[in-house]
Image (spheres, rainbow, N blue to C red):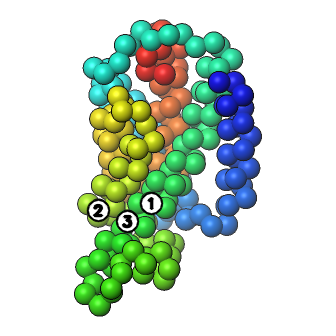
Amino acid sequence: AQISYALKIIIVPLLLVWAWKWYAPITGPRKISGSILYGIIFGLIGLAVWCLLLAPFIDIAGKPWAMSDFFLRLFAASLIVPVFEELFIRGYIFRVAFQWNVNRKKKTIKSPLNETLDHNSINDIKPGAWSVAAISISTIAFTAGHMPVEWLAAVAYSILISILWILRKDLLSCMIAHGVTNFSLGLYVYFTGQWGFW
């Protein structure tokens, strides 16, 4: 586990830096201080949602992690995973799904997906723009990256963060919320000994 997390901690940030020029903008039209505040609030709400919906499906006590493994995972989960996942889920998949849904409604476009991928740019989508299709597709993608016992919690969490995207109109608040949830979950597990959540 140590090697796996150590590699993630090295490789993923390098990939994030390398691909930086292709990202959708991280900040939006509103003040960054507001995004930080909303991110913290939604992150703590997300912690409660995650634990409440996951608890019925797991052995809460779980097995304790070795401290070195725990802190490596805490670091990755708090600082790297939120940036990577939010860029991919809400920065890319959500926007592609939104644009595809727009194109799907146009009678003149034969292949909405091809039009979306080949002729549209996700950067043209207004911050906070949303559709039921965008929320649904991005939620399915987010949930697919989790274990089956986590699916209910993952669906609810993804919808919560999509609501934050709609309200704040930026990825920064989503990244902060995701990071706060993961970090506070780690602290909760560490101090309560309820390792099943980890």
Mark 1 to mark 3 CA distance (whole Å): 6 Å
SS at badge 3:
helix
Residue 97: assigned label: 3
Q: Position of residue 171 (x, y in %)?
A: 50, 55
Residue 42: assigned label: none
Number of numbered discs? 3
Tag 1: residue type? Ile
Rendered view: 85 above or below 169? above
Name the side, left or right, on which 15 lies relative to 167.
Answer: right
Mark 1 vs 3: CB contact within 8 A = yes
Tag 3: residue type? Ala
Asked whether residue 30 is in view, the answer is no
Residue at 74% in and 40% down: 10
Tag 2: residue type? Ala
Mark 2 to mark 3 CA distance (whole Å): 6 Å
Mark 1 vs 2: CB contact within 8 A = no
Disc 1 target residue = 93
Q: Position of residue 190 (x, y in %)?
A: 53, 14
Frontmost residue, 122 versus 114: 114
Residue at 29% in and 35% down: 152
